[in-house]
Amino acid sequence: MNHISPIFRPLCPPALLRLLSACALALSLFSVPASAQDVDRSEIEKIVREYLLENPEVIADALSELERREKAAEEAARLEVLSDSSGILFDSSRQAVLGNPEGSVTLVEFFDYNCGYCKRAHADMVRLIEEDPDLRVVLKEFPVLGQGSVEAAQVAVAVNSIAPEKYGEFHEALLLSRGQANRDSALKAATGIGIDQDELLAAMTTDEAGQTIEEVYSLANRLGLTGTPSYVVGDEVVMGAIGYDQLREKLDVVKNCGEASC
């Protein structure tokens, strides 16, 4: 399974509560005096209860339809965010870009340096870049796994600001390193590829890291992202390490059709 951040929330319990509330509301509509309706409220409640007990599939059908409508609404909201925030999503001055910076097809990945599934998914990204010279990969620092992740992201932002040409090498070194990613391990990864530590520390005294991470948090929240890795391919938001084959298929569709589905 893919890592799910603590902000993940299941749909079914709220859906059930809303369904029950709707039932209660429906019953309340019959609360007018019996003389006006010529029907007794208790009799109506009895009829409704007996019907639901005899036909429990009605509740399951209603929950399925409610969940379908919620997903449709969420997808519509995501499409609106993708349209409204396309500049920040695909062309922010604060993002790191791998592959072909001028590529016609873009894959956006939201990741955390302490995410085990991001580590495994890294090989998929490398393979996609190697096989497709037209692929542009945008990396978004999305530290959701604690303070160590935030510290690692802060160093990564500084690396990208002073040595963007070395960011890819740094990214791989830190992402695939053993142990907890934090400030110390990120600095070690950066100096290990030849970045001057004093210059790096000076870059970290600015507010660029905080603004970069806040930009990504805001964008992720609007897109409804709940874990890492998460991707944007064309007009589709994909959550989880879906693997090389599915990513390749989605990218090919975007290349051929201009969006995630033809």
Image: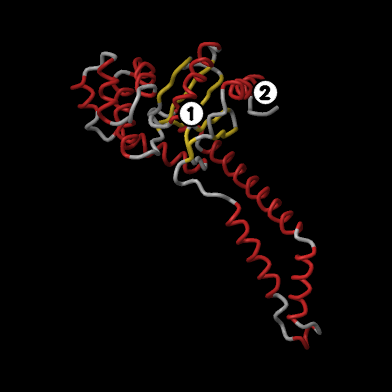
The residue pinned by badge 1 equals: 109
- Residue 154 falls left or right of residue 35: left
Q: In this view, does 210 lie above or below 119?
A: below
Query: For the residue carrying disc 1, how many other residues have a C-alpha within 10 Å: few (<14), some (14-19), or many (20+)?
Result: many
Q: In which quarter of the image is residue 192?
A: top left
The residue pinned by badge 2 equals: 257
Q: Is residue 238 above or below residue 249?
A: below
| Residue that protrudes farthest toward the bottom in the picture | 35
Q: Where is residue 154 in the image (x, y as percent from the top left)?
A: 30, 31
Query: For the residue carrying disc 2, how many other residues have a C-alpha within 10 Å: few (<14), some (14-19), or many (20+)?
Result: few
- Residue situated in front as seen by the camera: 188 or 102: 188
Q: In which quarter of the image is residue 97?
A: top left
- Residue 78 falls left or right of residue 205: right
Q: Position of residue 196 (x, y in %)?
A: 22, 17
Compute the Cα span from label 1 to label 2: 21 Å
* Mark linked to residue 58: none
| Residue that protrudes farthest toward the left in the picture | 198
Residue at (73%, 86%) from the top-left corner? 33
Amino acid type, residue under disc 1 in the picture: Glu
Pick whichever of labels 1 and 2 is earlier in the sequence. Answer: 1
Amino acid type, residue under disc 2 in the picture: Cys
Residue at (33%, 23%) from the top-left corner? 160
Q: What element carries label 1?
A: strand
Q: In which quarter of the image is the C terminus?
A: top right
